[in-house]
Image: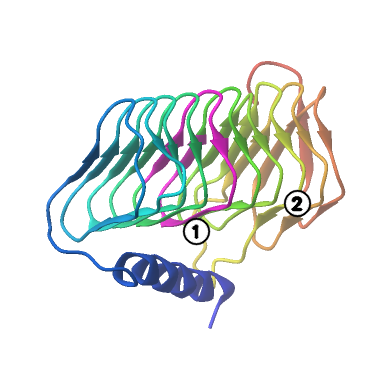
Amino acid sequence: MTVSTQLARWTVAAVAAMVLGCNYSSNDDISIPEGASHSGDGQTVNGNVEVGADADASDSNFSTINGSIVVKDGARVSDCATVNGELDIGDGSEAGSLRAVNGDLTIGRDARIEGRVQLVNGSVSLKPGSRVSGNVGTINGLIELRSAEVAGDLSNVNGGMLIVDGSLVKGDLTVKEAGDDRHGEPPRIVIGRDSRVTGNLVFERPVELFVHDSAQIGEVSGAEVNRFSGDEPG
């Protein structure tokens, strides 16, 4: 079994356990009003979750199987998980760990994620000023940081990475083996102007690695560094 397959199975199991491990009573949407204080977890099977702007649900976990989770600007929640749906964390919001199997994740400006981010089939976008304290990983999807910070590691298999506008990754950056000999186009890894990866850069499959002249990176294994000086690599 490949590393990516193991990770996918582990993530699906973790999300399912979070959704099904607690009591739920309906397939309705879950909605927390703007500015409300909320306690208690929220689970649904075929419904969406929305936490209103500036709501305080910092001790509450939210999960759904077939639905999206939206945390509006300035709201606070704990862990969030979905199997089939998007995750959207608003500007200035706070959350714990975030998990999704099939769906993209957007983390808004100046948001704080105090756990880790784990996806299987989906892209991850961190907006300016946002910070994730744990690892960020997806199997099939782009990881994009713009003036953002990840205190842990970055990893994916397919989709590439875009680390630009002075972003900081304090851990390692890894592109894992795809698990078979039928590699598609090499993932494109771009570390842009004034950005930093302080850990090691480890590539277990062919990639195209572009590093800006002003960027700082750790030791590289498995790829050739292509330096560039403009706004984007040629």
Quick check: can you spot residue 117?
yes
Label 1 element class: loop
Q: Is residue 109 magenta?
A: yes
From the image, tell me which residue sits under label 1: 139
Q: Which percent across, then down, holds residue 56?
A: 41, 35
From the image, tell me which residue sits under label 2: 172
- 99 lies above or below 37: below
For label 1, count other residues whose C-alpha is less than 10 Å away and answer few (under 14), some (14-19) or many (20+): many
- 209 lies above or below 139: above
Q: Which residues are magenta?
A: 104-125
Left or right: residue 38 compared with residue 176: left
Q: Which percent across, then down, holds residue 217?
A: 83, 39
Q: Which percent across, then down, holds residue 193?
A: 73, 21
Q: Which percent across, then down, holds residue 209?
A: 70, 42
Q: Is residue 47 magenta?
A: no
> In the orientation shown, which residue stands out farthest toward the bottom?
1
- Placement of the C terminus among the 4 image quadrants: top right
